[in-house]
Image: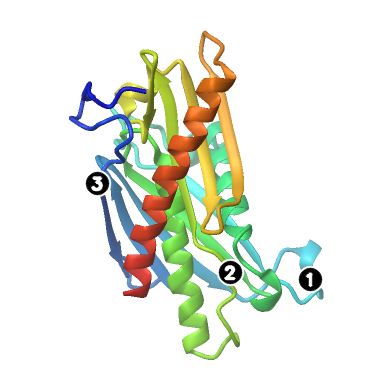
Amino acid sequence: MSDIKLRADGRKNDQIRPIKIARNYISHAEGSVFIEAGNTRVVCTATVEEKVPPFLKGKGKGWITAEYDMLPRASAQRIIRPQTTGKISGRFHEIQRLIGRALRAVVDLGRTGERTIWIDCDVIEADGGTRTASINGSFIALYDCMRNLVDRKVIDEMPINNFLSAISVGVVGGEVMTDLCFIEDSSAEVDMNVVMDSSGNFIEIQSTAEGATFSKQQFDELINLSIKSLQEIIEIEKKTLLS
């Protein structure tokens, strides 16, 4: 992997985009974040609902679920709102399921009581990596939400047992790169999304080849590069939440 040739936005192949985080962005939500990863910008909120889905009723456990959407002009072409079409797109449905799975993996739902935490992710500008930015922002919003419940003595202890981060990596023009922006993602030969906790355990790996296969060596390079980037993001989250 070469780090000499700079990418379209001036980064090296192993360099993530600058991340900016504004907490308590929405005053009504128990946890909220405005997160920027380069030109990808997402608002994430965490809302407490004092009930659980029917399949969990009476079991003493909570639930975390997510919804994901993009504003009409988050991308170059206007996106039609789902309430206009009457249905949510398959891609959006898959992304919100991914966000929910990722967050539930780092929370002891037995400590939350029978309540649901709704995570809402609204992309206001998309330049690649919207699902991974949504996961990172959602984790921070969820952390603040849970800390709010502890501070108000609604729950006894923090139920989050690990930090969480997500990143996109890929092969573009034969080069292994991290944190793909849109122009890179749209021309990638291989696209991979990786979610990991702060103990180094993988939660999800989504990898797809576009028009060409990829080797075990490239797969290993992508995984190793993702780990480096994920650890950097976790350090940013810790600095944001614990400092």
Residue closer to the observer: 91 or 172: 172
Q: Is 61 placed left or right of 41 in the picture?
A: right
Circle 2 is placed at which residue position? 161
Which badge, 1 or 3, is on the more N-terminal residue?
A: 3
Identify which residue is drawn at 36% across, 36% down: 179
Left or right of residue 87, residue 239 in this image: left
Question: Looking at the picture, how far across and down is residue 141, in whole percent?
Answer: 43, 65
Give the residue pinned by disc 1: 57
What residue is disc 3 on? 18
How far is mark 2 from mark 1, CA to CA?
Answer: 23 Å
Residue in the image at 58% along x and 84% along y: 157
> Relative to 167, is 55 above or below?
below
Q: Nearer the viewer, mark 1 or mark 3?
A: 3
Alpha-carbon distance for marks 1 and 3?
A: 42 Å
Q: Look at the picture and state if 17 lies above or below 3.
A: below
Q: Is residue 149 left or right of residue 7?
A: right
Kind of residue at disc 2: Asn
- Mark 1 neighbour density, 10 Å: few (under 14) some (14–19) many (20 or more): few
Q: Are marks 1 and 3 in contact (CB under 8 Å)?
A: no
Residues marked 3 and 2 touching at CB (< 8 Å): no
The picture places residue 124, in percent across and down from the top left corner, at 31, 45
Front residue of this view, candidates 22 and 161: 161
Helix, strand, or loop for circle 3?
A: loop
In percent of width and height, residue 102 lies at 58, 52
Which label lies toward us, 2 or 1?
2
Q: Quadrant of residue 7?
A: top left
